[in-house]
Amino acid sequence: MGRKLVIVMVGLPARGKSTMARKLGRTLELDGIRVRIFNNGELRRQLDTNANTSSSEFFSPANVQGREMREQISRMNIEKAQAFLADGGEVAIMDASNVTRERRQTIAAAFPGVPLCCLECLNADEEALEANLERKARLKEFRHLPPEKALESFVKRIAYYESISEPLDTEPNRILVDSFDSCILQEQITEVLPYYDRIRDIITTRVVRNLFLVRHGETVYNREDRIGGDSELTDKGLEQAKALAEHFATVRIPIIFTSNYTRTLQTASPIAERQDPCSIIALPEFNEIHAGVCEGMTYEEIRQKMPHVAKARGPNKYRYVYPGGEGYKTMEERVHRGLKKVFFLNNYDENIMIVGHRAVNRMILSSFLSRQEEEIPYIYMPQDCYYHIQVDPHKRIFELIAYRNVTSGW
Ligand code: F6P
């Protein structure tokens, strides 16, 4: 059996195609396979000397010049992929919308004798799609436009693609993937495809290159041992945020995910300021456990005034739910949903940072560590260290790293 394969990504813009392509490319590479991604959008941006290909009208099917340039870019990438495969390359990933049958047939005809697999990405999660559109509208190619205009232009571009889109049906090998949930929705494979078992494994497995899991700096409530609330960072907390910013100044962090609370936003903001560019995305899914009737109380006050709470929570901390609030168990679903958003939105970048809270970070860490339920609410989550997490099919690494600035006073 030959070992060459062409993967044709298919799908409307902002459906997670490039993230999936990078995840496939990177993991196959780790397996020792010679793989390369040919991305039409990147090539268009490189060739675009007068920056007018980001306008929605460039993508209008009625724009003959625009259409010709997009076809030309596709041909250029096909030629590069042909050369790559002829020179010992094994897997070529054609990363573009490829929404028309004609385009897919052109690609198939360009690789005689090499099996071709169409991989369509869709995302039925409205919230994640919206967040992804907003993220895209902040990209460099829209910098000349105010954010609402950029979003409008991008939405119009998608509508143009939608108007010419044709479903996968006659293609002999096709997989439909939900890129938000990382699951295979449909597949039809009519020949033996090299690497196919591995490809299915990669599609459905979470791969994390570098996740920096940070807890917010010290707050007024932390100092008083109070739980919940939305208090601000203390001077020491602000120093910790500055030290974090210094620590990560030479590490590229394109997006920092936080909760909606002041303390995570205050911690993330100096880190973002030292990066170029970096956006902060606040996700309600990462808000700290809600302690219901105990919000704002100290642990001592709970013991004194609500002994039944302290008594019931102690032996069963994971499953215990605060009256009128949450428990670790009941947070599970939302935190996992937040993580899915993170992986969908981060575009399979090298580095992801999450600035979260004690309980939320324990849940996030445990989703990689497979810890026993009863251990999770006791995972060490200090404020002068962060967790560095790397997970791929070849390894799983968790490191607790101190970022404390020895010259500062805390
Ligand atoms: O004390 C800070 C805090 O984030 C509280 O807001 C939260 O209730 C608590 O930690 C979670 O930790 P534990 O589950 O150990 O009480």
Image (spheres, rainbow, N blue to C red):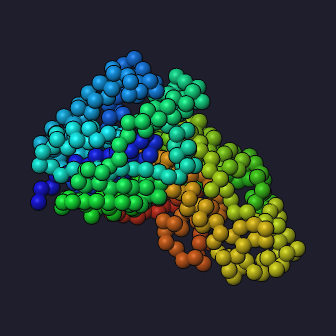
Estimate the x, y position of residue 202 in percent, counting from the top left: 34, 59
- For residue 173, say whether it is visible: yes
The residue positioned 56% from the left and 43% from the top of the image is 130
The part of the image, by quadrant, that contains residue 223 is bottom right
Residue displayed at 32% across by 49% down: 168
| Near-viewer residue (139 or 105) | 105
The residue lying toward the viewer, choosing from 214 and 36, is 36
Left or right? Give the position of 128 relative to 87.
Answer: right
Up the image or down, 71 lies above or below 259; here it is above
User: What is the number of callouts on the image?
Assistant: 0
Q: Is residue 289 left or right of residue 109?
A: right
Where residue 57 appears, as percent x and y from the top left, is 44, 24
Residue 343 versus residue 371 in the image, above or below: above
Whether 135 is drawn above or below 329: the answer is above
Residue farthest to the top? 50
Q: Find the residue positioned furthest to the right.
A: 305
Identify the residue shown where x is 43% and y is 53%: 179
Q: Relative to 200, is 234 on the left or the right? A: right
Figure quadrant of the N terminus: bottom left
Find residue 94 and report its image quarter.
Answer: top left
Q: Residue 304: x, y in percent?
A: 87, 75
Q: Residue at x 62, y 56 (%)?
A: 285
Q: Closest to the observer: 38 or 8?
A: 8
Residue 233 x, y percent position in the rendering: 73, 48
Q: Is residue 38 visible?
A: no
